[in-house]
């Protein structure tokens, strides 16, 4: 994460903070256009790492809204199920979203709101709904975080 933080040491980004080994970077910037920020960040990552890395850029207010709109809000996480959030590049095609949600069985549940996928699972490490699987089924870039990380990022 130190390497990642160093990549963001440019005049465009201030107060850069990273969180654990999750690829989350929180920063202040004067640029409000998330598409433009994404292009800048992807160029910096390519230059700093030597290979392309897709990025998703969200305002902290957007993440706070994801937390507030949690469709599984009454859930108390325990050993049985944990909550995960996949941030999607854009809202998925309705048919693709419905097909993905319909694949959930047993002790797993999924809900897609706009460009956010909420997922309950006993074990993210054992589910077929990995980030790569979601990206393939929806045909877009996604990044998945556990609920604790989503909640922590808005406090940084």
Image (cartoon, rainbow, N blue to C red):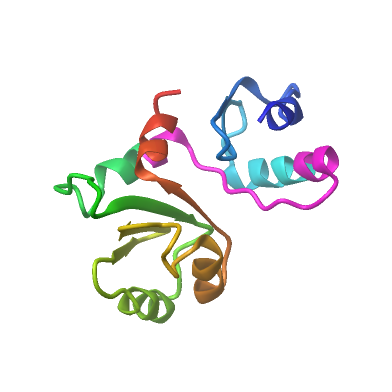
Occupied quadrant, residue 129: bottom left
Residue located at (71% from left, 51% from top): 53
Q: Nearer the viewer, residue 130 or 96?
A: 130
Q: Is residue 67 left or right of residue 152?
A: left
Q: Is residue 102 left or right of residue 16?
A: left
Quarter of the picture containing the N terminus is top right
Answer above or below: position of 127 versus 137: above
Residue located at (30% from left, 42% from top): 67
Answer above or below: position of 85 versus 41: below
Report the label total. 0
Residue 86 on the magenta span: no
Residue located at (69% from left, 26% from top): 2
Q: Is residue 53 left or right of residue 65?
A: right
Q: Nearer the viewer, residue 71 or 123?
A: 123
Residue 59 on the magenta span: yes
Q: Residue 13: where, in percent of width, then height?
A: 66, 25
Residue located at (56% from left, 43% from top): 57
Q: Residue furthest top?
A: 15
Answer above or below: position of 31 versus 16: below
Q: Nearer the viewer, residue 13 or 127?
A: 127
Q: Residue 54: where, in percent of width, then height?
A: 67, 53
Occupied quadrant, residue 91: bottom left
Occupied quadrant, residue 23: top right
Q: Residue 136: where, in percent of width, then height?
A: 56, 73
Q: Residue furthest left?
A: 74
> Magenta region: which residues?
44-63
Q: Residue 43: where, in percent of width, then height?
A: 78, 44
């Amino acid at each position: 994460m130190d390497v990642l933080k160093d990549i963001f040491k440019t005049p465009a980004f201030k107060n850069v903070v990273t969180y654990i080994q999750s690829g989350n970077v929180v920063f202040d910037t004067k640029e409000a256009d998330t598409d433009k920020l994404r292009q800048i960040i992807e160029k910096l990552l390519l230059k700093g790492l030597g290979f392309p890395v897709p990025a998703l850029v969200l305002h902290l207010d957007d993440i706070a809204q994801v937390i507030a709109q949690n469709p599984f809000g009454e859930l108390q996480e325990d050993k049985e199920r944990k909550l995960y959030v996949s941030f999607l590049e854009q809202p998925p095609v309705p048919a693709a979203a419905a097909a993905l949600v319909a694949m959930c069985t047993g002790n797993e549940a999924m809900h897609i709101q706009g460009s956010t996928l909420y997922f309950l699972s006993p074990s993210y490490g054992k589910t077929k709904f990995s980030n790569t699987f979601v990206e393939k089924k929806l045909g877009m870039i996604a990044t998945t975080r556990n609920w604790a990380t989503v909640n922590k990022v808005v406090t940084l």
